[in-house]
Amino acid sequence: MKRDTVKLPSEMVIDFRQLTLKEENYLAAAARSRKGSQEKTLVEVVARCTEAIVEPGPYPWAKPGQKPVWNDMLNGDFFKSLIELRKLSYREGKEYDIDLKCPNRACNNAFGWTVDLDKDLLVKRLPEESAAALREGRPLEAVVAGKKVFYNLGMVKDTAFQEKLDKRFPGREMACLLRARIVKVEGVDPKDLMNWLDGEGKGPYEGLTSDDAEDLRSEFERTDCGVDTEIEVECTRTSCRNVFRLDLPFLQILSPTRAVKNRRKRREEQGDLETPEVPETPTTDDLLDGSDSSEG
């Protein structure tokens, strides 16, 4: 079984082992379920394949030799772990095939695209100010719309919290996304935080402008770490060649079927796979010609 030691964006260092068929079973079952269950399974699989912490990084609870608590880890560390686990587990793991459709409505070309996980994705390290806040167990601060906002770094457990918010506040997805990170806003009653964000529902606030919301998102991004999952793609149709950007889908990154598909594609490109020759069906004349060595 293959193993590797990986440094994550937070500077935590972890020993990983490759996937086994048991984990592939879990992933295959999760692929048929809803998005939330798929994300939960990914966390469970990464946890199973994590052998031990080598260096704790900025996590105050982490100890060398122990296993990390993935729900209390940064999203940036988790996404990097998914990439490293894929590379470790499959022979062509650093190539990730995705199926796309050109957004140009005059084209609509369906095509495949291969992402080099080593070369095409940028990794952003955790800034020191954020590492210090994590070590000390305190939120970060930003001023948005004239108010001081206290917020946490993006954690794996935020997904479950955001799901609860989505159910409680349907149709307010963008506000829920921001609310999942906010601890408090100076001068705003905690029960009015959603109203402060988008002005929906009962409350005294009109909500943030798009500029204010962008300022808050930019502050989250500036102080966070992880993998830049936005990639640039060019339509393969010669008459189109439309260039567009998209976020790399991560839910299927550990899919064994995609790894097999990618390996076959590589072998075809290298000429290792050839179309087998099918022998011709002999005709009656072939059977009756003088080549038959049997004696009558």
Image: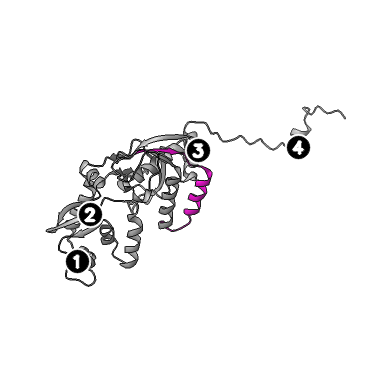
- Is 227 located above or below residue 207 in the figure? above
Q: Nearer the viewer, mark 3 or mark 4?
A: 3
Q: Nearer the viewer, mark 4 or mark 2?
A: 2
Q: Nearer the viewer, mark 4 or mark 1?
A: 1
Element under label 2?
A: strand
Q: Which residue is mark 2?
A: 151
> Residue 72: x and y, percent?
34, 50
Q: Nearer the viewer, mark 2 or mark 3?
A: 2
Is residue 29 shown in magenta? yes
Q: Which residue is mark 1?
A: 189
Q: Which residues are magenta?
A: 13-35
Is residue 25 shown in magenta? yes
Q: Label 4 sits on what residue type?
A: Thr
Q: Which residue is mark 3?
A: 264
Q: Label 3: few (<14), some or many (≥20) within 10 Å? A: some
Tell me if label 2 and label 3 are in contact, CB under 8 Å.
no
Element under label 1?
A: loop
Q: Nearer the viewer, residue 284 or 180?
A: 180
Tell me if label 4 and label 2 are in contact, CB under 8 Å.
no
* Residue 3 visible to an observer of this rendering: yes
Q: Nearer the viewer, mark 1 or mark 3?
A: 1
Element under label 4?
A: helix
Q: Label 3 sits on what residue type?
A: Arg
Q: Nearer the viewer, residue 148 or 285?
A: 148
Point out the residue furthest to the left here. Answer: 146
Residue at x-position 31% and y-position 63%: 165
Between the C-alphas of marks 2 and 1, the distance is: 15 Å
